[in-house]
Amino acid sequence: MANPTFSVVLPDIHQGPAYIWYNVASPKNPNRLLVDASGNPVTPAANWAATTAYNVGDEIVDINGNVERAVVAGTSGGTQPTWPASLGSKTTDGSLTWVNLGAPVSLGSSEGPAKFEAKAKLEEISIDQETAPVDVVMTAEDATLDFTLKESSLAKVSKFLGHGTLSSGTDTGLPAGAQAYEQMTIGGLLQIPTASVAITSPRRGFSNPGKFFVACLYNAYGSAALDLSFTRTKESVYKVTFKGLAVLARPVGDRVCQFYRQT
């Protein structure tokens, strides 16, 4: 057997921006979250199927372009139901129930690095007869996406501020020409929304098509506080953290997140 030799593969040294996506359609095991030639997540077309069994947590994209998640397991009907357009609406379909999570959306411009972290808590097993641990077991795991956003659209803020309620409209009490508004109100016990969240980052040296690093939390919730500062000398930014939850309907080893690189 030949001895190993040192080599450098420059395209394997990753440096590139991250693009952040909320409410992408969660890929079924063992599939990946697909992206197009520009790194945009691919929304599966017409993937609802008649008389098909779905588990809790399974997702489809309805004919309105909204992600629907199964919240009651069952078998779909013989014909596609009428999908309501409003966020959070539930639809009975055969013996199962879907909830409307809305359309996939880009969270816009960011500042600084976007960080994907997947870690496990490990506990060493020791015995009195040995000075070093003799085994190790995993007792917990955690997957997060952290980044700092710059766009102050409240529609985007609402994606991670789960205990807030978003509304928009027109207020004639405001000055003419500036009566449209978006608003968030906070206070009261609410169910925290969850969604699939992803980042894509282009690899250097590839175009037409591009190649990307892709990371996806299958079912995540926003856990960071909203902290907005206002000053003349710098634009307002806010930090965002999404934490992944286990999707129990997925197989062991693929319940929280995935990441891959196009080679």
Image (cartoon, helix red, strand yellow):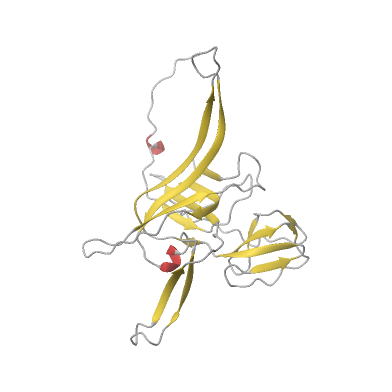
Q: Say whether residue 178 is visible.
A: yes
Residue at left offset 65%, top offset 46%: 250
Taking the spot 72% from the left edge, 56% from the top edge, the residue there is: 73
Please state which of residues 112 and 182 is positioned toward the viewer in this rendering: 182
Residue 256, placed above or below residue 109: above
**In the rendering, at what x and y percent does residue 78 appear?**
78, 65
Horizontal side of residue 48 vs 157, given as left or right: right
Relative side of 84 to 23, left or right? right
Count of labels in the image: 0
Q: Position of residue 70 (x, y in %)?
A: 67, 59
Q: Residue furthest left?
A: 233
Q: Residue furthest top?
A: 129
Residue shown at 54%/63% (left/top)? 189
Decide if residue 211 is in sight here: no
Q: Position of residue 142 (x, y in %)?
A: 51, 42
Front one among 187 and 227 = 187
What residue is shown at x 41% (from left), y 57% (from top)?
A: 225
Residue 74: x and y, percent? 75, 58
Relative to 252, 24 lies left or right: left
Camera-nearest residue between 53 and 9: 53
